[in-house]
Amino acid sequence: MLQQQTEIEALFDAAGRLAADALQSNQDRTHPVVHRVSPEELIRCLELELPTEGRGLESVLDLARKTLHYSVRTGHPRFMNQLFGGFDAAAILGEWICALTNTSMYTFEAAPVGTVVELALIERLNRFVGFENGEGVFAPGGSVSNLISVLAARHRAFPHVKDEGLRPSDRPVMFTSAEAHYSLQRAGMIAGLGRNGTVCVPVDEVGRMIPGELERCILEERRKGRTPFFVAATAGTTVPGAFDPIDEIANVAERHGLWMHIDGSYGGSVLLSRQHRHLMRGCERADSIAWNPHKMMGVPLSSSATLMRTKGSLVSTMGMNADYLFHEESDANWDLGDRTLQCGRRVDALKLWFSWQVLGDRGFEARVDGLFDQASRMRELVREREGFRLIREQEGANVCFRYLPRAHRSAAGEERDRHEHEATLRIRGKLAEEGSFLVNYASLDGAATFRLVASNPDTTEEDQTALLDAIEAED
């Protein structure tokens, strides 16, 4: 036993140094964002075949080094690829403690610390939203938070579904913007509506849902004999980062008796900013909100809160009264298991709690404001540089732009779009292969477009300029 304890101490001493080195290398711009290799080569390097006889604790240190070497450095200042980035040392410690305690969040008895921490954080997030008597729960990600909200809305509109399932006469239909996250349509599919049970409402030139079009779509579906019950506004769309006009959508939802959800998975964190919270004006009128601290707030994946305006919505929707798990004891009212889709659930609240202790409200506010400033600075650099142009007006922390190669600078209209499309795919592929930058692309207004995400406070104007230089160099 003593020998085993010595091995464990040596393992974690080495692991601590390895973690510190990894975080330091994340900040080193001489290191690539990723060492790109083929899947076949990666399989060879990692020696994936599992042993018949165990190799001992020391063997996993080598695996840890290889894992870090070949993984994408999402904390690197030149990682601009996803809606998350950077790193938070306190939150990483919280994640480590989560694994060390290895418990599940279904009851207070099993997870006393996790339970009270999660409830405190839900209360704090609800306060920023304006839900005075709200509730909530942490979920594995924004997709699950959106699904929970669709199920809660379905339960309110069709309460018989919980016991009987949908009736042929129900014919439910839900609404999202044409640029909403795909998880909303998938949530409708899982909820029994089918893919055709979600209507995509047209957006304006920025990418925001048009409230008048929502009204038109609702009336049209009613004429078809369908039953509208749910609309999702988006606070920060995935590609252009647009914020739907929540107040105006709430007016339509209230007029027609629809549950209004806000997918604030990406943009919900603007509520922490006095400068930018106006982008979610009217959010307190929503019935539910998805908010991912693992995006703008920089908490490690995954950290996603599902917030409800009305207490009791979650248990009413999903409660199953499993008496072998939920016992009638004095602390049973603290049990969270009947509020979620899951039984086993990680203590994901812990890392956000640790991070909030270090940064406080003002630290998170500074982070959000800094990311918006970073995106604004990048837009100016794009405007100033010949051959580059912004695609759409943008209001969030995303920057969507294209590059027109020198040989085609005289092109216009569809011909220009075609050359920009081809250049985006070709250049983005080369940058990813080299590993010096990782910036994503998406189809926007009919052509492939660079989509840069301001997600790391350590990204500088020099990094942004270097990216534009690298794009030009691949011309």
Image (cartoon, rainbow, N blue to C red):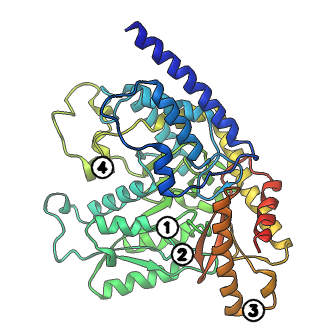
> Whole-Å distance between the Cαs marked 1 and 2?
8 Å
Indicate which disc, 1 or 2, sits on the residue closer to the N terminus: 2
Indicate which disc, 1 or 3, sits on the residue closer to the N terminus: 1
Between marks 2 and 4 in the image, the one whose residue lies nearer the viewer = 4
Task: Say which amino acid is labelled 2.
Answer: Met
> Whole-Å distance between the Cαs marked 4 and 1?
23 Å
User: Which residue is label 3 attached to?
Assistant: 412
Quadrant in the rendering for residue 320:
top left
Residue 336 spot, x, y in % from top left: 32, 38
Q: Residue at x 76, y 91 (%)?
A: 411
Indicate which disc, 3 or 2, sits on the residue closer to the N terminus: 2
Say few, some or many: other residues with alpha carbon within 10 Å of mark 2 (under 14 / 14 to 19 / 20 or more). many
Q: Is residue 363 above or below residue 419?
A: above
Looking at the figure, which quarter contains the C terminus? bottom right
Task: Say which amino acid is labelled 3.
Answer: Ala
Residue 90 spot, x, y in % from top left: 60, 32
Indicate which disc, 4 or 3, sits on the residue closer to the N terminus: 4
User: Which residue is label 1 attached to?
Assistant: 233
User: Which residue is label 2 attached to?
Assistant: 209
Quadrant in the rendering for residue 436:
bottom right
User: Which residue is label 4 attached to?
Assistant: 341
Say few, some or many: other residues with alpha carbon within 10 Å of mark 1 (under 14 / 14 to 19 / 20 or more). many
Task: Say which amino acid is labelled 4.
Answer: Leu
